[in-house]
Structure formats: structure tokens, C-alpha cells
Image (cartoon, rainbow, N blue to C red):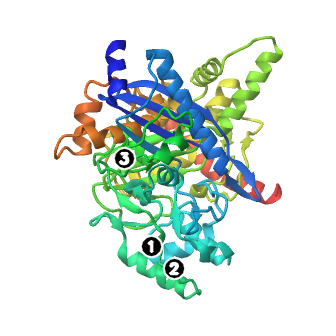
Amino acid sequence: MTHDIKKLIRSGKTALGIEFGSTRIKAILVDENNNPIASGAHDWENRLENGIWTYSLDDIWTGVRHCYQEMAVDVKNRYGETLTTIGAIGFSAMMHGYMVFDKEGKLLVPFRTWRNNCAAPAADELTALFNYHIPARWSVAHLYQAILNGEEHVKEIDFQTTLEGYVHWKLTGEKVIGIGEASGMFPIDIASKQYHPGMLQKFDALIASKGISLKIEDILPKILVAGQEAGRLTEAGAKLLDPSGNLHAGIPFCPPEGDAGTGMVATNSVKKRTGNVSAGTSVFAMIVLEKELSKAYPEIDLVTTPVGDLVGMVHCNNCTSDINGWVDVFGEFARLCGVELTKPELYNKLYFESENGDKDCGGLLSYNYVSNEHITKVDAGRPLFVRTSESRFSLANLFRAHLFSALGALKVGCDIMLKEEGVKLDAITGHGGLFKTPRVGQSYLAAAINAPVTVMKTAGEGGAWGIAILANYVVTKEEGESLEEYLDHKVFAGQEGITLAPDPDDVAGFEAFAKRYVKGLPIVRQAVIDMD
């Protein structure tokens, strides 16, 4: 087996996916059948600077080089091969945000990530103008907010893109973006698979009335769909990614995609009536729709799959960050008692203990809002834990409440699609850090949406694996083979997965918790005011 992999590596019959997550950059190298054969990672963290959540350009390039180097070292250690060529490469990243450049390619303002809610006034105005929900994290909302703010840099903008679009541009010279990520920059016309022409005109007229002469279509990246080649690694790009000089230029790239699109690929959720939930630092549900919703909802974003099919998306800014903080505290206590537990051991013990709690968490209430949460109209981060004197306060109920809270805002949005709009689901797949501990997060998600949830054996690979598959699709697909067919036949055929049906008692318990969760929202909103 190792001998066969060595031959694949030498001949470049591999694909590399690199994804910029909120706390980790991950690289996965796969073989021609999309099996992971090597990996690398780099931990990083955003910073709050001048009221903006951001990463610097140095953070980006130091991180991606180290991540690539770790993967290349893994290849050397496992197979004794120096990595010099790859069949195809793809980049993915946390969605949307704001990166704008002048004609010389200079970044005009620090990268504004998806986590910033500063563009909410612009998003509301654009939603009214387009009669189409525009979230505050979308690129067009950030651009229009900068215009409303009278920011001087706007008149110098020559190009606007997202994080993965930026990295792709610097490595290939191509100003392009995958359609899934493009749909979070500006609304898409599903029929043409391009930016919506009517909305482009409305936006240009709006900003012209404010004295801004740019045409938004001129500064946005070109849209590509899955399967199209999106450029090749340049000599300069090869040195930028791998300063050792081992990596050769000329490697083809797939369109850069956001983590929503790669999550759909990594869970085989690109078909209509399928969906997935990605649960990590943030949590979002993606459901591929059979038809458009009856009206616009502020809780539901309309985006697309990597091939351009309509998707209803519920995106929440917060998921596991607050849980991570509580786990760290219990880790400190364990060390204080002279017990050294690994992170996986801590998570497993606490998650499994939550299963011994009351179905409704014993009357406990938790809000995991490390940052703002637009779904529930909470404007700033205020993590809270609340109980009454009658609540049943135990370790099991405490962690059950934290885990339910991680899915609380998501349930608010999903209930609109599943209950009010009657959207049909044949399959939901979970992936991300919440599902690393077997069974627990999976069963709680099933209870939250009252539907069976599948977690694949590859769930921990996440978006880096998804973008590696999209890279491989460019170079290994057969003539006329759709992405749906490719995933069914060449990626997930025979793939192991565990499906859990919702337990009726857990469903009832989550519904009781959800009612308490919604009723208690004024508490956390008031905390935003009183703890300013």
C-alpha cells in the first residue's frame, strides 16, 4: 500500500485541499480516489483590533506556509518522498467578510471577517432595496457600510474578494471565486449562475446617488462552478506557498470555495432534499431546496451549492467556543487535583456525562454568545449561564445545557424552514468538532431538528477534505460527470456512516429547553446594555 502511494505522490496523482478555519488552518492531501494520505495544520486565532475581528496578512501567509510545510513533512515521514508536484490544489476559508485592494494590489483596510456585525445597518438597507435577505457578514454589506461610513479607502477600491479568493489570486494570478462563495458576496441569479443583473443595477444606482462612481461588477471576482479549472500555480505562487523551493509551478487549481460549500461536498449534501450541519466555532445548516421560499426571512440566507443550486442556510456565529472555555476550566481543575487529562479525554468525559442529565437540562439555561448572534438579535458577545433556585444543578445538566445552547440559535432558524415552509429533508449529515465525541452531539442535533442525523467516518476531515475533493474533481471527472454523480460513485460509495434517529424523549426535552431559551433572550439582550 505504501509503495502504491509513493508512486502516486511521485507522479502527481494527488489533490491538496487547504481550508482556513476560524481557529485552525488545515491541509489534507488525498490520493486519486479521494482517500486522505497526509495532513498538516496550523493553529491561529482572530484578534479584536479597533473594534474589528481580523487576521493580518502576516497571519495568513505564516499560517498557510506552516500548514503546507507540516503536510509536506508528513508526506516525507510516512512515505519517504519529497513533495514536488500535486495533481490539483484547492483553497477554502471561513465565509465572506471584506478584503479590498487598490490597483497595485495593496490591502486597503484590515481584513474584516464574517464575525463582525458592524455592517448591520447597510445589510438592512440593502435587504429592503433588493427585497432579498442580505446578511451583515456578506461582502456587499461590508462594502456598502464603508460607503455609508464615508471611509476614504472606498474610492481606491479596484478589487474585492474573500480570504480564499485572495490566497488563490496570489498563488495563480486569477481573480476568480467559486459560485457558492460568490453567493455570499452578492446575490446570484440561479438561472444564469452569475451575479444578479437587476440587483447589480440597483446597487450601482444607490451608490451613485452618494457620489460613488465605481461599478460593483467591475470589482467582484469572476464566478466559476465546480469542475472548472480556475488557474495554475505560478512560479511566484509556488515560492510563496513553499519557500523551500521543492514545489513546482503549473499545478491546476479548482475554484476557491467557502466553508459552506466544502461542508456540503464533505458530507455528500449537494443533492436536493439533502442537507448538512457544520458545527465548530460557528454553526450553520445548509438545506438544498427544491424551490424558492415563499418570502424572504432575516434568519435564512439564500446561497448555492458549488454547482449553483439554491440552498437555504441558517448561519449562527456561535457554537463551540463557550463550551471550549468550560472544558478548559474543568481541565484546570483536574490539573489542580493532580490529574492530567488530554483534551479528547476531557471532552469525552464531559459530553458523555451530559447524557445522564434531565431531558430538558433540569431547568438550566445557557447562552453561548461569545460574539453577537443575529439570528436571535443579540448585538454583542455576552456568554451567560442562568438558573433558578429550583433548577436541578448538576454536572450532567450543566453540560447538557451548554451542548443544547450550541444548537439553540440554529434551531430557531431551522424551525422556520422545516415547520413554517414545510421544506422536505431526506438526509441530514453532521460534521465538525461538535461531532468528534461519538453519539452525543449527533443525538442532540437529531433532537433539535427532529430528523435522523448521519455522521460519516470522515466527519473529522471537514472542509479541507471537501476542497481537496473539489480539486480532484477538476482533474479526474469523466466527460459529463456531474458533481452529484462524482460524489455518489467515487467518493462516498461504500463510505461508513452512523445514522441516529431522534429519540422522542430527547425531542420533547429539546423543545422544552428551546421555549425557555427563546423566552430568556431578553436577559442576554439586557446584559449587552448593562455590561457595555
**Residue hosting label 2:** 214
Q: Is residue 255 above or below residue 346?
A: below
- Contact (Cβ within 8 Å) of mark 3 with mark 1: no
Q: In this rendered view, identify the residue nearer to me: 489 or 299.
A: 489
Q: Which one is earlier in the sequence, the residue at label 2 or at label 3? A: 2
Distance from disc 2 to disc 3, alpha carbons, whole Å, reads 29 Å
Compared to residue 377, the image places residue 128 above or below, namely below
The C terminus lies in which quarter of the figure? bottom right
Disc number placed over residue 254 in the picture, else none: 3
Amino acid at pointer 1 = Asp
Q: Which residue is identified by label 1?
A: 218
> Pointers 2 and 1 in contact (CB under 8 A)?
yes
Q: Is residue 308 above or below residue 74?
A: below
Q: Nearer the viewer, residue 246 or 474?
A: 246
Q: Given the image, on which type of amino acid does mark 3 rest?
A: Cys
Left/right of residue 52 with respect to residue 240 in the rendered view: right
* Residue 81 seen anywhere in this rendered image of the structure: yes
Q: Secondary structure at mark 1?
A: helix
Q: Residue at x 58, y 21 (%)?
A: 352
Q: Give the image quarter of residue 296.
A: bottom left
Type of amino acid at the residue the image marks with label 2 = Leu
Mark found first going from the N terminus, 3 or 1: 1
